[in-house]
Amino acid sequence: MYDAIIIGSGISGASLAYELAAYKLRIAVIEKGSDICSGTSRGNSATVHSGHDAAYGTQKALYNVMGNAMFDQLCSDLKVPFIRNGTILFAINEADMEEVRRLKHNADKNHVPGVEVLDRDGLLRIEHYFGPDVIGGLYAPTGGIVCPYTLVIALCEQALRNHVDFFLNNKVMCIQKNATGFFVTTNKTVFQTRFLFNCAGTHADEINNMVSSNKITILPRKGEHILLDKKLAPYVRATISQTPVNLPSGGHTKGMGIMPSVDKTIILGCDAHDVTDKDDTATTAIGLDEITSYFEKNWRHLPISEKIPKFPHNRIINAFGGLRPHSTTDDFIIGESEDVAGFFNMAGIESPGLTAAPAIAKKIVQDAAEKYHFEKTDVFIPTRDHVKPFRDMNDEERRQAVMENKEYGDIVCRCEMVTKAEIKAAIHSPLGATNVNAVKMRTRAGMGRCQGGFCSPVVAKILAEELSIDLTEVTQSGEGSNIFFPKNGNQAKRNSQ
Amino acid sequence: MKTYDLIVIGGGPAGMAAAISARENGCEDVLILERGSSLGGILNQCIHNGFGLLTFHEELTGPEYAARYAEKICALNIDYQLNTTVIRIDREKKVTAINADKGLQILQSKTIILAMGCRERPRGALNIPGSRPAGIFSAGTAQRIINIDGYMPGHNVVILGSGDIGLIMARRMTLEGAKVKVVAELMPYSSGLKRNIVQCLDDFGIPLKFRTSVVKIHGDKRLTGVTLARMDDRNKPIPDTEEFYECDTLLLSVGLIPENEISDEAGIPLDPSTCGPVVNNDFETEAEGIFACGNVLHVHDLVDFVSQEAASAGKNAACYIRRNGLSNKERTVRLFGSDGVRYTVPQILNPDRKDEDLTVRFRVGEVYQNAFISVFFNDQCILRRKKPIVTPGEMELIKLRKEQINQFPDLKSITIKIEKG
Ligand SMILES: Cc1cc2nc3c(=O)[nH]c(=O)nc-3n(C[C@H](O)[C@H](O)[C@H](O)COP(=O)(O)OP(=O)(O)OC[C@H]3O[C@@H](n4cnc5c(N)ncnc54)[C@H](O)[C@@H]3O)c2cc1C
Ligand SMILES: Cc1cc2nc3c(=O)[nH]c(=O)nc-3n(C[C@H](O)[C@H](O)[C@H](O)COP(=O)(O)OP(=O)(O)OC[C@H]3O[C@@H](n4cnc5c(N)ncnc54)[C@H](O)[C@@H]3O)c2cc1C
């Protein structure tokens, strides 16, 4: 019997787990994926939005600004890289400037700190180049960047250290309410809990509708991104996009932007398309085309165009898609359900959800703690122990690292300089990686320019050794995604799957 | 701190041949740094034959060819460190390397030879839409899995790209009992060697479809299929030509990229067409005393040429040390490829230092039949040679005699062109 069960381990579930762990509660997180962070929090624009554009008066605006302010402390506690690189919206005509002024007004009402309307010279004081057509823009200095899955993993690892249980590969199929709480049935087992927290991303409507008669609808809205090689990192600093007037996707997106990632790759995106499949994050020809043609056309406005004059097709290393859990109410659905006591929603968490989630979680937990008299523990550890990645070490630190552990001298992923020591650590970490993608998310092995061409078989071998399984049992992303088969046409094993 | 005469980065055929030749030309302290667990580079996984026809006049497998050089390395007592990754070099010829036993080492050398080979272009670089299931491999990775690790990457295969590795893998997978359904090639010609198309596809009845590409990837956990479509001249899919192929494996053989991260970070200028360093006729990069050869310089299809080029680089490194480090670069002549010639190697000629004939290697951008390869000294055509066929898949070479070059005291540029017949 648990006190609290959280369904979903994206940024919402992870933030809640971390907040709840500060109380004397038995807590579990249930996740259908083969790893934590299997949904939208895995692939998004990775921007910690300032809150200048969230419509005043909405929950989105409120929690965006609150969440943004929490990032310095949170990321420092969890040892997660976070950079306030600032956000710029540039304008190329008077209509754009009109929008810039409207956004400034909105930002002020939202209490976003430091937002400025700048003319061309003002912009050039922040970035030393813009294309000749750029006449001015909006500058939001509190905009930042974070690696979303690194943050989610850190939150989950820390929750686990504070005794939260995690159950992967458990898909919630049905929920029954009884006098003391809920029976939560998954494809594997049945859990019992007093309080239930719904953080199921695009599936949050299904979960809510199993319990509450206040039905909600979540529509998956796809957004795609293109990643460029980190070689371009010196030319991209602030998060930059065009004022979102007349964009192909209209108001559904924060506009086509270019931003650095904390790992120094460059992210381009994103578009927005309503889709029907709630798990289909596949990239589409239309989406990728939309992004490339947009940037081909508008590259010349960007600061990077000073040094790299044309959109560098040959620097594309990858593309990925994500699904915004868009609620038909057009706002976050958060807090205790009106008709079911003890059932809490953190649903419809679309952009700026990554930014807002820590603040929403805090608020939900505070309210619940107050109403149900949760008691704080005095053993909660908020700060995470974390070893610096080898690629970030200087020569002396590297020398030291190899001296202490020889396997730091064995570089497995050449592009991102990930060592065998780190891959083993990821496998043996609190929420240990059990497949190749899970190792990748924790170490960046395979995320560089060669995209795992060399290292993914090596990572698979290390997984087999460390988990004492056969190489043919190693998967890319959980059950059914095996990578190797026995030689000599032995298909029996495969056909039986 | 000890100073090496020569540090060779990479112990593939290029690195080995360079080290041997440097030693034979008088280099004392030679060290090869290789990140793999044995010498031989990519050859270790190429268990097919077809190597060494030019060098040894017999057909060897990749490992056999490599072994001939590795034996020589041992016979000449050339020092090497395996499982050792070079992470940085600089123009002062300091080499930073890491391995498990010695940890982080900073080594000083008088010369460096870059011989890091190349890597394969991944799926991401192609921007193919769709999901990201297991079962998508670059062809070289699949080759490693079968030939070195002893596993199968899958059983029903589509291959995208008709580069040599893709062709060889079509045969290899077939021999291992897999069904290779089709090889799709975006271009109207193959970038692989003719002999590989015959021996690896035709002999096994595997269809090769030109002007065709993968437009969608299907499958959630493991690949379930790909959609192929015919492409128009702008490389956009032609509507209604889509065809679904059920498969559990997609191999990509869509190009190789010289592995020049450490060269680039050291500020060594690269040629955007080859993605390798710009070199002169000594195979010296624009950083003095740093030479390059093999696939890191430009992608080769025949290992014999790699070995030749590397031997020359090794010898020149030895000369450089004998000259006491001074490069005589007073006169420089630029080499250009134009009218269909994508690049030349070398890109620069220092005629004052040229005491032998000049070999220029180059590749063309498309297929030409009955065309002329013409060489211009400044604006003057000095050579025109008819070729029945030149294709992007096969590296061409042209030899310019020393006397020919010396007859042109005010030579500024050498241009190689394709002229239609
Ligand atoms: C293209 C795109 C760009 C974005 N850019 C930004 C940005 O730059 N800044 C920003 O602040 N926000 C951004 N967002 C929004 C942000 O990514 C989301 O708000 C956030 O990730 C949502 O997190 P979540 O935890 O609610 O959902 P998810 O991360 O989807 O987590 C839900 C989890 O629940 C699990 N689950 C679902 N159903 C069940 C079940 N039945 N049983 C068990 N487990 C289940 C899923 O597997 C998943 O792991 C972007 C979104 C998209 C799509
Ligand atoms: C699949 C395939 C089939 C082929 N078939 C034929 C054929 O039939 N006939 C033929 O003649 N030729 C063939 N070739 C071509 C020939 O094998 C190559 O051109 C040749 O191997 C290139 O030699 P190299 O030494 O430049 O590169 P490689 O063989 O790639 O060697 C480079 C070495 O450098 C090492 N290295 C790289 N970076 C570092 C670093 N930072 N630190 C330390 N070490 C490093 C690598 O580990 C590697 O061992 C084939 C090639 C391939 C890939």
Image (cartoon, rainbow, N blue to C red):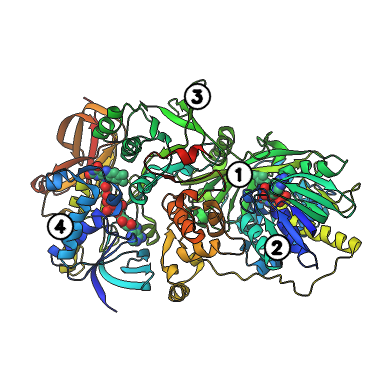
Residue A468 position in % (x across, y down): 49, 59
The answer to whether marks 4 and 3 mark residues whose Cβ atoms lie closer than 8 Å is: no
First of labels 4, 3 by sequence position: 3
Question: Real-space Cα distance between discs 3 and 2?
Answer: 47 Å
**Does any portion of residue A51 appear in the rendered image?**
no
For disc 2, the chain is A
Amino acid beneath label 2? Phe
- Give the quarter of the image for residue B195: top left
For disc 3, the neighbor class at 10 Å (few under 14, some 14 to 19, many from 20) is: some
B406 left or right of A256?
A: left
- SS type, badge 1: strand
- Residue at 33% of width from left, 29% of height from top? B189
- Mark 4 chain: B
Mark 1 vs mark 4: give the one in front. Answer: 1
What residue would you read off at disc 2?
Answer: A71
Looking at the figure, which quarter contains the N terminus of chain B? bottom left
A284 horizontally vs A60: left or right: left
Question: In front: mark 2 or mark 4?
Answer: 2
Identify the residue under disc 1. A269
